[in-house]
Image (tube, grey):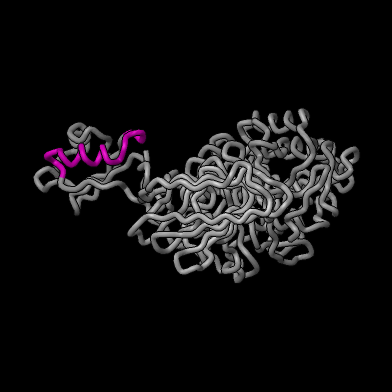
Protein backbone atom coordinates (compact mmCIF):
# COMPACT_ATOMS: atom_id res chain seq x y z
CA UNK A 1 0.00 0.00 0.00
CA UNK A 2 1.76 3.06 -1.30
CA UNK A 3 0.93 5.44 1.54
CA UNK A 4 2.85 3.31 4.02
CA UNK A 5 6.31 4.31 2.78
CA UNK A 6 8.69 5.58 5.48
CA UNK A 7 12.28 6.85 5.21
CA UNK A 8 15.27 7.31 7.47
CA UNK A 9 15.42 10.83 6.06
CA UNK A 10 12.28 12.90 5.89
CA UNK A 11 9.81 10.91 3.83
CA UNK A 12 6.22 9.97 3.22
CA UNK A 13 3.73 8.76 5.74
CA UNK A 14 1.68 7.48 3.37
CA UNK A 15 -23.18 28.98 22.57
CA UNK A 16 -24.06 25.69 21.61
CA UNK A 17 -25.49 22.71 23.43
CA UNK A 18 -22.82 20.64 25.07
CA UNK A 19 -24.19 17.44 23.59
CA UNK A 20 -26.23 18.03 20.47
CA UNK A 21 -25.88 19.86 17.20
CA UNK A 22 -28.49 22.59 16.83
CA UNK A 23 -30.04 23.97 13.66
CA UNK A 24 -28.04 26.74 12.04
CA UNK A 25 -29.41 30.26 12.60
CA UNK A 26 -28.38 33.86 11.90
CA UNK A 27 -26.32 34.86 14.98
CA UNK A 28 -28.31 37.08 17.34
CA UNK A 29 -31.44 37.29 15.17
CA UNK A 30 -34.96 36.16 16.12
CA UNK A 31 -38.35 36.02 14.44
CA UNK A 32 -40.97 37.41 16.86
CA UNK A 33 -44.69 37.19 16.14
CA UNK A 34 -46.61 39.73 18.19
CA UNK A 35 -50.07 39.43 19.64
CA UNK A 36 -52.52 41.31 17.46
CA UNK A 37 -53.13 44.28 19.71
CA UNK A 38 -49.44 45.22 19.77
CA UNK A 39 -48.64 44.91 16.08
CA UNK A 40 -49.44 48.55 15.20
CA UNK A 41 -46.83 50.04 17.51
CA UNK A 42 -43.80 51.78 16.05
CA UNK A 43 -40.44 50.05 15.65
CA UNK A 44 -38.92 52.45 18.16
CA UNK A 45 -41.52 51.59 20.80
CA UNK A 46 -41.23 47.87 20.09
CA UNK A 47 -37.44 48.06 20.37
CA UNK A 48 -37.79 49.49 23.85
CA UNK A 49 -40.45 47.00 24.91
CA UNK A 50 -38.64 43.96 23.51
CA UNK A 51 -35.19 45.08 24.62
CA UNK A 52 -33.80 44.55 21.14
CA UNK A 53 -33.18 46.36 17.88
CA UNK A 54 -36.00 45.83 15.36
CA UNK A 55 -34.25 45.00 12.10
CA UNK A 56 -37.26 44.28 9.88
CA UNK A 57 -41.02 43.74 9.92
CA UNK A 58 -43.53 41.48 8.16
CA UNK A 59 -46.76 43.42 8.86
CA UNK A 60 -49.10 40.89 7.25
CA UNK A 61 -48.11 38.33 9.90
CA UNK A 62 -47.55 40.66 12.88
CA UNK A 63 -43.86 39.69 12.75
CA UNK A 64 -40.78 41.69 13.67
CA UNK A 65 -37.19 40.55 13.13
CA UNK A 66 -35.00 41.57 16.04
CA UNK A 67 -31.28 41.54 16.78
CA UNK A 68 -29.84 40.66 20.17
CA UNK A 69 -26.18 40.38 21.30
CA UNK A 70 -24.65 37.31 19.65
CA UNK A 71 -23.05 36.10 22.89
CA UNK A 72 -26.44 35.42 24.49
CA UNK A 73 -27.55 31.80 24.66
CA UNK A 74 -30.40 31.11 22.27
CA UNK A 75 -32.35 29.18 24.92
CA UNK A 76 -32.20 32.12 27.33
CA UNK A 77 -33.32 34.66 24.73
CA UNK A 78 -36.27 32.51 23.64
CA UNK A 79 -37.34 31.90 27.24
CA UNK A 80 -37.11 35.58 28.19
CA UNK A 81 -38.96 36.88 25.14
CA UNK A 82 -41.66 34.20 25.45
CA UNK A 83 -42.53 35.69 28.85
CA UNK A 84 -42.99 39.16 27.37
CA UNK A 85 -46.75 40.01 27.24
CA UNK A 86 -46.39 41.40 23.71
CA UNK A 87 -45.06 38.18 22.26
CA UNK A 88 -46.99 35.27 20.81
CA UNK A 89 -44.16 33.28 19.16
CA UNK A 90 -40.36 33.65 19.20
CA UNK A 91 -37.93 31.57 17.13
CA UNK A 92 -34.31 31.84 15.98
CA UNK A 93 -33.88 33.22 12.47
CA UNK A 94 -33.03 29.79 11.06
CA UNK A 95 -30.82 29.33 8.01
CA UNK A 96 -31.95 26.99 5.25
CA UNK A 97 -29.73 25.69 2.47
CA UNK A 98 -30.09 23.60 -0.64
CA UNK A 99 -29.02 19.98 -0.20
CA UNK A 100 -25.80 19.77 -2.19
CA UNK A 101 -24.44 16.49 -3.50
CA UNK A 102 -21.84 16.68 -6.27
CA UNK A 103 -22.27 14.83 -9.56
CA UNK A 104 -18.74 13.41 -9.56
CA UNK A 105 -19.20 9.76 -10.63
CA UNK A 106 -16.65 8.28 -8.17
CA UNK A 107 -18.19 9.85 -5.07
CA UNK A 108 -19.50 6.45 -3.92
CA UNK A 109 -15.90 5.19 -3.64
CA UNK A 110 -14.96 7.92 -1.16
CA UNK A 111 -15.98 6.31 2.13
CA UNK A 112 -14.11 8.97 4.08
CA UNK A 113 -16.62 11.55 2.80
CA UNK A 114 -19.74 9.39 3.20
CA UNK A 115 -19.44 5.90 4.70
CA UNK A 116 -22.14 3.58 3.44
CA UNK A 117 -20.72 0.62 5.41
CA UNK A 118 -20.50 2.07 8.92
CA UNK A 119 -22.79 4.99 9.67
CA UNK A 120 -21.08 7.92 11.32
CA UNK A 121 -17.53 6.79 10.52
CA UNK A 122 -16.68 9.54 8.07
CA UNK A 123 -16.06 13.29 8.13
CA UNK A 124 -19.75 14.18 7.43
CA UNK A 125 -18.82 15.86 4.17
CA UNK A 126 -22.32 15.67 2.67
CA UNK A 127 -23.79 17.65 5.56
CA UNK A 128 -20.88 20.11 5.50
CA UNK A 129 -21.38 20.82 1.79
CA UNK A 130 -24.86 22.16 2.55
CA UNK A 131 -23.05 24.97 4.39
CA UNK A 132 -20.02 25.55 2.15
CA UNK A 133 -18.17 23.76 -0.62
CA UNK A 134 -14.99 25.78 -0.25
CA UNK A 135 -13.58 28.99 -1.64
CA UNK A 136 -10.91 30.11 -4.09
CA UNK A 137 -9.88 32.60 -1.42
CA UNK A 138 -8.37 29.76 0.63
CA UNK A 139 -4.82 28.65 -0.19
CA UNK A 140 -3.57 25.22 0.93
CA UNK A 141 0.07 24.22 0.50
CA UNK A 142 0.56 20.49 -0.10
CA UNK A 143 4.12 19.96 1.10
CA UNK A 144 4.91 16.62 -0.50
CA UNK A 145 6.04 15.08 -3.81
CA UNK A 146 4.40 17.83 -5.83
CA UNK A 147 1.10 17.96 -7.70
CA UNK A 148 0.12 16.72 -11.13
CA UNK A 149 -1.01 20.14 -12.27
CA UNK A 150 -2.34 18.67 -15.52
CA UNK A 151 -4.68 16.24 -13.75
CA UNK A 152 -8.25 16.84 -14.97
CA UNK A 153 -9.61 16.72 -11.39
CA UNK A 154 -6.95 19.05 -9.95
CA UNK A 155 -6.03 21.64 -12.55
CA UNK A 156 -9.04 23.89 -11.97
CA UNK A 157 -8.24 24.18 -8.26
CA UNK A 158 -4.55 24.96 -8.56
CA UNK A 159 -3.01 28.09 -7.11
CA UNK A 160 -1.30 30.28 -9.67
CA UNK A 161 1.32 32.89 -8.97
CA UNK A 162 -0.06 35.69 -11.11
CA UNK A 163 3.23 37.62 -11.24
CA UNK A 164 4.98 34.60 -12.77
CA UNK A 165 2.03 33.45 -14.87
CA UNK A 166 1.79 36.86 -16.53
CA UNK A 167 5.50 37.63 -16.41
CA UNK A 168 8.47 36.77 -18.57
CA UNK A 169 9.58 33.15 -18.89
CA UNK A 170 12.97 32.48 -17.30
CA UNK A 171 12.71 35.53 -15.05
CA UNK A 172 12.03 35.78 -11.32
CA UNK A 173 9.17 38.22 -11.86
CA UNK A 174 8.06 38.44 -8.22
CA UNK A 175 11.58 38.56 -6.77
CA UNK A 176 11.09 35.62 -4.36
CA UNK A 177 14.25 33.86 -5.51
CA UNK A 178 12.53 31.19 -7.62
CA UNK A 179 12.02 31.46 -11.37
CA UNK A 180 8.65 30.69 -12.96
CA UNK A 181 7.02 29.31 -9.81
CA UNK A 182 3.55 29.40 -11.35
CA UNK A 183 1.97 26.44 -9.46
CA UNK A 184 4.42 26.23 -6.57
CA UNK A 185 8.07 25.33 -6.13
CA UNK A 186 10.45 22.37 -6.12
CA UNK A 187 13.00 22.00 -3.30
CA UNK A 188 14.24 18.47 -4.04
CA UNK A 189 17.59 20.08 -4.88
CA UNK A 190 17.19 22.59 -2.10
CA UNK A 191 20.32 24.53 -3.01
CA UNK A 192 18.88 25.18 -6.47
CA UNK A 193 15.08 25.26 -6.17
CA UNK A 194 12.98 25.46 -9.30
CA UNK A 195 9.47 26.58 -10.11
CA UNK A 196 8.28 23.17 -11.30
CA UNK A 197 6.49 21.13 -8.60
CA UNK A 198 5.26 18.40 -10.97
CA UNK A 199 4.54 15.16 -9.12
CA UNK A 200 6.77 12.31 -10.30
CA UNK A 201 5.64 9.92 -7.54
CA UNK A 202 1.87 10.26 -7.08
CA UNK A 203 1.71 10.79 -3.32
CA UNK A 204 1.27 14.57 -3.40
CA UNK A 205 -1.41 14.31 -6.07
CA UNK A 206 -3.26 11.71 -3.99
CA UNK A 207 -3.26 14.02 -0.97
CA UNK A 208 -4.28 16.97 -3.16
CA UNK A 209 -7.31 15.11 -4.53
CA UNK A 210 -8.66 14.45 -1.05
CA UNK A 211 -8.21 18.09 -0.08
CA UNK A 212 -9.52 19.70 -3.21
CA UNK A 213 -10.36 17.68 -6.31
CA UNK A 214 -12.79 19.84 -8.29
CA UNK A 215 -16.36 19.11 -7.27
CA UNK A 216 -19.59 18.89 -9.23
CA UNK A 217 -17.78 18.81 -12.57
CA UNK A 218 -19.21 15.49 -13.70
CA UNK A 219 -15.89 13.65 -13.65
CA UNK A 220 -13.66 11.67 -11.32
CA UNK A 221 -13.74 12.30 -7.60
CA UNK A 222 -14.51 15.23 -5.35
CA UNK A 223 -12.34 16.72 -2.63
CA UNK A 224 -13.41 17.92 0.78
CA UNK A 225 -13.35 21.32 -0.95
CA UNK A 226 -15.03 21.58 -4.35
CA UNK A 227 -13.33 24.93 -4.71
CA UNK A 228 -9.97 25.85 -3.23
CA UNK A 229 -6.45 26.81 -4.32
CA UNK A 230 -3.79 24.10 -4.05
CA UNK A 231 -0.12 25.06 -4.00
CA UNK A 232 2.44 22.40 -4.88
CA UNK A 233 5.46 22.53 -2.57
CA UNK A 234 7.69 19.66 -3.64
CA UNK A 235 10.63 18.61 -1.49
CA UNK A 236 10.15 14.84 -1.69
CA UNK A 237 11.64 13.16 -4.75
CA UNK A 238 10.23 10.44 -6.98
CA UNK A 239 11.47 7.82 -4.48
CA UNK A 240 9.51 9.51 -1.66
CA UNK A 241 12.39 11.01 0.30
CA UNK A 242 13.65 14.54 0.89
CA UNK A 243 16.04 16.59 2.99
CA UNK A 244 15.66 18.72 6.09
CA UNK A 245 16.96 21.65 4.07
CA UNK A 246 14.20 21.16 1.50
CA UNK A 247 11.52 20.84 4.19
CA UNK A 248 12.55 24.09 5.89
CA UNK A 249 12.70 26.00 2.62
CA UNK A 250 9.37 24.54 1.50
CA UNK A 251 7.57 25.58 4.69
CA UNK A 252 9.00 29.10 4.56
CA UNK A 253 8.07 29.42 0.87
CA UNK A 254 4.47 28.33 1.49
CA UNK A 255 4.00 30.81 4.34
CA UNK A 256 5.67 33.64 2.40
CA UNK A 257 3.40 33.06 -0.60
CA UNK A 258 0.24 33.24 1.52
CA UNK A 259 -0.80 29.66 2.34
CA UNK A 260 -2.92 29.42 5.50
CA UNK A 261 -3.10 25.61 5.67
CA UNK A 262 0.03 23.43 5.39
CA UNK A 263 -0.71 19.74 4.72
CA UNK A 264 2.20 17.48 5.69
CA UNK A 265 1.93 13.76 4.96
CA UNK A 266 5.58 12.99 5.72
CA UNK A 267 7.96 12.40 8.59
CA UNK A 268 11.18 10.78 9.73
CA UNK A 269 14.56 11.73 11.09
CA UNK A 270 15.13 12.86 14.64
CA UNK A 271 14.32 16.03 16.53
CA UNK A 272 15.40 19.07 14.51
CA UNK A 273 15.55 22.48 16.13
CA UNK A 274 15.73 24.20 12.73
CA UNK A 275 12.63 22.39 11.45
CA UNK A 276 10.84 23.24 14.68
CA UNK A 277 11.76 26.90 14.17
CA UNK A 278 10.35 26.84 10.62
CA UNK A 279 7.04 25.46 11.93
CA UNK A 280 7.13 28.07 14.71
CA UNK A 281 7.45 30.79 12.05
CA UNK A 282 4.33 29.37 10.41
CA UNK A 283 2.59 29.45 13.78
CA UNK A 284 3.60 33.08 14.27
CA UNK A 285 2.05 33.87 10.87
CA UNK A 286 -1.30 32.34 11.92
CA UNK A 287 -0.86 29.25 9.71
CA UNK A 288 -1.97 25.74 10.74
CA UNK A 289 0.48 22.83 10.29
CA UNK A 290 -1.40 19.53 9.87
CA UNK A 291 0.86 16.48 10.12
CA UNK A 292 0.60 12.71 9.67
CA UNK A 293 1.14 10.82 12.92
CA UNK A 294 3.16 8.12 11.14
CA UNK A 295 2.82 4.49 10.10
CA UNK A 296 4.94 2.47 12.54
CA UNK A 297 2.20 1.34 15.00
CA UNK A 298 4.10 3.55 17.43
CA UNK A 299 3.03 5.33 20.60
CA UNK A 300 4.04 8.90 19.81
CA UNK A 301 3.69 9.85 23.48
CA UNK A 302 6.51 7.47 24.39
CA UNK A 303 8.55 7.69 21.18
CA UNK A 304 8.07 11.05 19.40
CA UNK A 305 7.68 11.08 15.62
CA UNK A 306 8.54 14.29 13.80
CA UNK A 307 7.21 16.68 12.66
CA UNK A 308 3.89 15.43 14.11
CA UNK A 309 4.95 15.69 17.74
CA UNK A 310 6.66 19.07 17.84
CA UNK A 311 5.26 21.00 20.78
CA UNK A 312 4.09 24.00 18.77
CA UNK A 313 0.54 25.40 19.08
CA UNK A 314 -0.34 25.13 15.38
CA UNK A 315 0.67 21.46 14.94
CA UNK A 316 -2.33 19.13 14.53
CA UNK A 317 -1.37 15.45 14.43
CA UNK A 318 -3.60 12.94 12.60
CA UNK A 319 -4.00 9.16 13.04
CA UNK A 320 -5.65 6.86 10.50
CA UNK A 321 -8.82 4.80 10.91
CA UNK A 322 -10.43 2.16 8.72
CA UNK A 323 -14.01 2.15 7.44
CA UNK A 324 -15.21 0.31 10.57
CA UNK A 325 -13.90 3.06 12.84
CA UNK A 326 -10.92 1.13 14.16
CA UNK A 327 -7.44 2.59 14.45
CA UNK A 328 -5.56 1.36 11.38
CA UNK A 329 -3.13 -1.44 12.24
CA UNK A 330 -0.20 0.62 10.94
CA UNK A 331 -1.18 3.97 12.43
CA UNK A 332 0.80 5.69 15.15
CA UNK A 333 -1.22 6.89 18.11
CA UNK A 334 -0.85 8.83 21.35
CA UNK A 335 -3.32 9.86 24.05
CA UNK A 336 -1.59 13.23 24.30
CA UNK A 337 0.52 13.85 21.19
CA UNK A 338 -1.88 12.64 18.47
CA UNK A 339 -4.92 14.87 18.27
CA UNK A 340 -7.59 13.38 15.96
CA UNK A 341 -8.28 10.47 13.66
CA UNK A 342 -9.41 10.55 10.03
CA UNK A 343 -10.10 8.05 7.23
CA UNK A 344 -6.81 6.53 6.10
CA UNK A 345 -7.35 2.97 4.80
CA UNK A 346 -8.16 2.25 1.15
CA UNK A 347 -8.64 5.91 0.30
CA UNK A 348 -9.44 6.50 -3.35
CA UNK A 349 -7.98 9.65 -4.88
CA UNK A 350 -6.09 11.18 -7.77
CA UNK A 351 -2.51 10.21 -8.65
CA UNK A 352 0.04 11.23 -11.27
CA UNK A 353 -0.59 11.09 -15.02
CA UNK A 354 -4.30 11.80 -14.62
CA UNK A 355 -5.05 8.55 -12.82
CA UNK A 356 -6.77 7.38 -9.63
CA UNK A 357 -5.91 4.71 -7.04
CA UNK A 358 -6.63 3.50 -3.49
CA UNK A 359 -3.80 4.04 -1.02
CA UNK A 360 -3.52 3.68 2.75
CA UNK A 361 -1.58 5.52 5.43
CA UNK A 362 -1.72 8.39 7.86
CA UNK A 363 -0.66 10.23 4.69
CA UNK A 364 -4.21 9.69 3.46
CA UNK A 365 -5.82 10.67 6.77
CA UNK A 366 -4.00 14.00 6.97
CA UNK A 367 -5.53 15.60 3.82
CA UNK A 368 -9.03 14.86 5.10
CA UNK A 369 -8.24 17.12 8.05
CA UNK A 370 -6.43 19.66 5.88
CA UNK A 371 -9.58 19.79 3.77
CA UNK A 372 -11.71 20.45 6.85
CA UNK A 373 -9.35 23.27 7.83
CA UNK A 374 -9.78 24.81 4.38
CA UNK A 375 -13.58 24.50 4.58
CA UNK A 376 -13.51 26.30 7.92
CA UNK A 377 -11.49 29.15 6.42
CA UNK A 378 -13.92 29.45 3.52
CA UNK A 379 -16.75 29.90 6.01
CA UNK A 380 -14.86 31.93 8.63
CA UNK A 381 -11.93 33.66 6.88
CA UNK A 382 -10.68 35.37 10.01
CA UNK A 383 -9.73 32.20 11.90
CA UNK A 384 -6.09 31.75 12.89
CA UNK A 385 -4.26 28.46 12.61
CA UNK A 386 -4.56 27.89 16.35
CA UNK A 387 -8.30 28.63 16.28
CA UNK A 388 -8.76 26.16 13.43
CA UNK A 389 -6.89 23.48 15.39
CA UNK A 390 -8.94 24.13 18.51
CA UNK A 391 -12.20 24.00 16.54
CA UNK A 392 -11.35 20.72 14.81
CA UNK A 393 -10.36 19.14 18.10
CA UNK A 394 -13.34 20.46 20.07
CA UNK A 395 -15.82 19.18 17.49
CA UNK A 396 -14.23 15.79 16.75
CA UNK A 397 -16.74 12.95 17.00
CA UNK A 398 -15.76 10.37 19.65
CA UNK A 399 -15.70 6.79 18.38
CA UNK A 400 -14.83 3.62 20.34
CA UNK A 401 -11.91 2.73 18.07
CA UNK A 402 -10.03 5.89 19.03
CA UNK A 403 -10.64 5.82 22.76
CA UNK A 404 -7.28 5.96 24.49
CA UNK A 405 -5.56 6.38 21.12
CA UNK A 406 -5.83 10.11 20.37
CA UNK A 407 -6.39 13.15 22.55
CA UNK A 408 -9.92 13.89 21.35
CA UNK A 409 -10.83 10.18 21.18
CA UNK A 410 -12.55 11.05 17.93
CA UNK A 411 -12.64 11.50 14.17
CA UNK A 412 -12.48 14.98 12.67
CA UNK A 413 -15.93 16.08 11.52
CA UNK A 414 -16.43 18.76 8.88
CA UNK A 415 -20.08 19.52 9.66
CA UNK A 416 -19.53 19.81 13.41
CA UNK A 417 -16.50 22.03 12.84
CA UNK A 418 -18.45 24.36 10.56
CA UNK A 419 -21.38 24.59 12.96
CA UNK A 420 -19.13 24.61 16.04
CA UNK A 421 -21.13 21.87 17.72
CA UNK A 422 -20.16 19.00 19.97
CA UNK A 423 -21.28 15.53 18.94
CA UNK A 424 -23.89 13.89 21.20
CA UNK A 425 -22.83 10.81 23.19
CA UNK A 426 -22.77 7.65 21.08
CA UNK A 427 -25.11 5.19 22.75
CA UNK A 428 -23.42 2.37 20.85
CA UNK A 429 -20.12 3.20 22.55
CA UNK A 430 -19.64 0.98 25.63
CA UNK A 431 -18.13 3.92 27.51
CA UNK A 432 -21.71 5.23 27.85
CA UNK A 433 -23.11 1.95 29.21
CA UNK A 434 -23.47 0.69 32.77
CA UNK A 435 -20.57 -1.37 34.12
CA UNK A 436 -19.87 -4.13 36.62
CA UNK A 437 -16.50 -4.91 38.15
CA UNK A 438 -14.45 -7.76 36.73
CA UNK A 439 -11.02 -9.15 37.52
CA UNK A 440 -8.93 -11.10 35.05
CA UNK A 441 -5.21 -10.72 34.46
CA UNK A 442 -2.29 -12.49 32.87
CA UNK A 443 0.94 -12.80 34.85
CA UNK A 444 3.08 -9.62 34.56
CA UNK A 445 5.07 -10.26 32.52
CA UNK A 446 3.45 -13.30 30.97
CA UNK A 447 5.50 -16.39 30.15
CA UNK A 448 6.38 -17.84 26.79
CA UNK A 449 4.11 -20.40 25.13
CA UNK A 450 1.19 -19.40 27.35
CA UNK A 451 -2.40 -20.41 26.78
CA UNK A 452 -4.71 -18.87 29.36
CA UNK A 453 -8.51 -18.79 29.38
CA UNK A 454 -10.73 -16.28 31.22
CA UNK A 455 -14.52 -16.00 31.41
CA UNK A 456 -16.16 -12.63 32.06
CA UNK A 457 -19.68 -11.28 31.77
CA UNK A 458 -22.67 -9.38 33.13
CA UNK A 459 -25.58 -11.62 34.00
CA UNK A 460 -28.75 -10.93 32.03
CA UNK A 461 -27.19 -8.42 29.63
CA UNK A 462 -28.10 -8.31 25.94
CA UNK A 463 -24.68 -7.01 24.96
CA UNK A 464 -21.36 -6.60 26.76
CA UNK A 465 -17.92 -5.11 26.14
CA UNK A 466 -14.76 -5.98 28.07
CA UNK A 467 -12.59 -3.17 29.47
CA UNK A 468 -8.80 -3.63 29.36
CA UNK A 469 -7.27 -1.19 31.81
CA UNK A 470 -3.84 -2.26 30.57
CA UNK A 471 -2.97 -4.27 27.47
CA UNK A 472 0.58 -4.71 26.21
CA UNK A 473 1.69 -7.74 24.20
CA UNK A 474 4.15 -8.46 21.41
CA UNK A 475 2.21 -7.26 18.35
CA UNK A 476 1.00 -10.02 16.00
CA UNK A 477 2.65 -12.80 18.01
CA UNK A 478 1.01 -12.64 21.44
CA UNK A 479 -2.74 -12.07 21.39
CA UNK A 480 -6.06 -12.16 23.17
CA UNK A 481 -8.97 -13.73 21.28
CA UNK A 482 -12.50 -12.93 22.44
CA UNK A 483 -15.30 -15.45 21.82
CA UNK A 484 -19.01 -15.01 22.49
CA UNK A 485 -21.16 -17.59 24.28
CA UNK A 486 -21.71 -19.53 21.03
CA UNK A 487 -17.97 -19.88 20.43
CA UNK A 488 -17.88 -17.31 17.64
CA UNK A 489 -14.64 -15.28 17.42
CA UNK A 490 -15.58 -11.64 17.97
CA UNK A 491 -12.20 -9.91 18.11
CA UNK A 492 -8.44 -10.45 18.26
CA UNK A 493 -6.35 -7.87 20.17
CA UNK A 494 -2.57 -7.64 19.98
CA UNK A 495 0.03 -4.97 20.65
CA UNK A 496 -0.68 -2.03 22.96
CA UNK A 497 -4.29 -1.23 23.86
CA UNK A 498 -4.48 0.37 27.31
CA UNK A 499 -7.77 1.96 28.44
CA UNK A 500 -9.71 0.13 25.74
CA UNK A 501 -13.11 -1.54 25.44
CA UNK A 502 -13.42 -4.63 23.30
CA UNK A 503 -15.78 -4.87 20.39
CA UNK A 504 -19.44 -5.32 21.34
CA UNK A 505 -20.26 -8.92 22.21
CA UNK A 506 -23.78 -10.30 21.88
CA UNK A 507 -25.09 -12.00 25.02
CA UNK A 508 -24.09 -11.71 28.65
CA UNK A 509 -20.75 -13.52 28.74
CA UNK A 510 -17.55 -14.01 26.80
CA UNK A 511 -14.38 -16.09 26.86
CA UNK A 512 -10.95 -14.50 26.47
CA UNK A 513 -8.17 -16.82 25.29
CA UNK A 514 -4.60 -15.50 25.61
CA UNK A 515 -1.75 -17.15 23.70
CA UNK A 516 1.92 -16.23 23.38
CA UNK A 517 4.95 -17.51 21.51
CA UNK A 518 8.37 -18.15 23.05
CA UNK A 519 10.11 -14.87 22.18
CA UNK A 520 9.25 -11.46 23.69
CA UNK A 521 7.26 -11.47 26.94
CA UNK A 522 5.57 -8.15 27.76
CA UNK A 523 3.12 -6.97 30.44
CA UNK A 524 0.01 -8.82 29.30
CA UNK A 525 -3.37 -7.42 30.30
CA UNK A 526 -5.70 -6.47 33.14
CA UNK A 527 -9.49 -6.67 32.74
CA UNK A 528 -11.15 -4.53 35.42
CA UNK A 529 -14.80 -4.14 34.34
CA UNK A 530 -17.47 -5.14 31.85
CA UNK A 531 -19.84 -2.67 30.22
CA UNK A 532 -23.34 -3.92 29.50
CA UNK A 533 -26.79 -3.01 28.27
Q: Is residue 80 above or below residue 214?
A: above
Of the 4 image quadrants, the one containing the C terminus is bottom left
In the image, taking residue 366 as reference, residue 8 lies left or right, namely: right
Q: Is residue 212 above or below residue 392?
A: below
Residue 238 seen by the camera: yes
User: Which stretch appears magenta?
Assistant: 69-87
Q: Is residue 155 above or below residue 173?
A: below
Q: Position of residue 257 (x, y in %)?
A: 72, 39
In the image, taking residue 129 as reference, residue 278 lies left or right, namely: right
Residue 261 occupies quadrant: top right
Choose between 49 and 469: the one closer to the eye: 469
Task: Give me the residue at 51% from left, 43% from top.
Answer: 469
Residue 340 occupies quadrant: top right
Choose between 354 and 46: the one closer to the eye: 354
Task: Give me the residue at 76% from left, 32% from top.
Answer: 271
Choose between 337 and 509: the one closer to the eye: 509
- Residue reaching furthest to the left: 37
- Give the total of numbered labels: 0
Q: Position of residue 519 (x, y in %)?
A: 74, 50
Of the 4 image quadrants, the one containing the N terminus is bottom right
Residue 83 in magenta stretch: yes
Q: Position of residue 251 (x, y in %)?
A: 74, 38
Choose between 242 and 228: the one closer to the eye: 242
Residue 219 occupies quadrant: bottom right
Task: Give me the residue at 74% from left, 53% from top.
Answer: 204
Q: Position of residue 140 (x, y in %)?
A: 66, 46
Task: Give me the residue at 46% from left, 69% from top.
Answer: 486
Residue 338 in magenta stretch: no
Residue 417 seen by the camera: no
Amino acid sequence: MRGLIGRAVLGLFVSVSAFAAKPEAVPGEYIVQLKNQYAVQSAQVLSQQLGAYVKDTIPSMNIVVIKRPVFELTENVVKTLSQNPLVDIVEPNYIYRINKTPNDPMLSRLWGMNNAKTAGVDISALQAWDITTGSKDVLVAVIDTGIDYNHPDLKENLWTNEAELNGQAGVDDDGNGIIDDIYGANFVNAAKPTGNPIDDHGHGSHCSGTIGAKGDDGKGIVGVNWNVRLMGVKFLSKDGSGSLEGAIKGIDYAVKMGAKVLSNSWGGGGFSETLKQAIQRANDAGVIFIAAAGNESNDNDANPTYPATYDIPNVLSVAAIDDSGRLASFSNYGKSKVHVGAPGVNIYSSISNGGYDSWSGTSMATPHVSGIAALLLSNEPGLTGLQIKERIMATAKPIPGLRGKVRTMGIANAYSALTNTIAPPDQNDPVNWKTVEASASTPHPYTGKSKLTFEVGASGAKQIAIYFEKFDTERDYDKAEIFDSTGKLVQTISGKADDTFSAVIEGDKATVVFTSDDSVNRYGFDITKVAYR
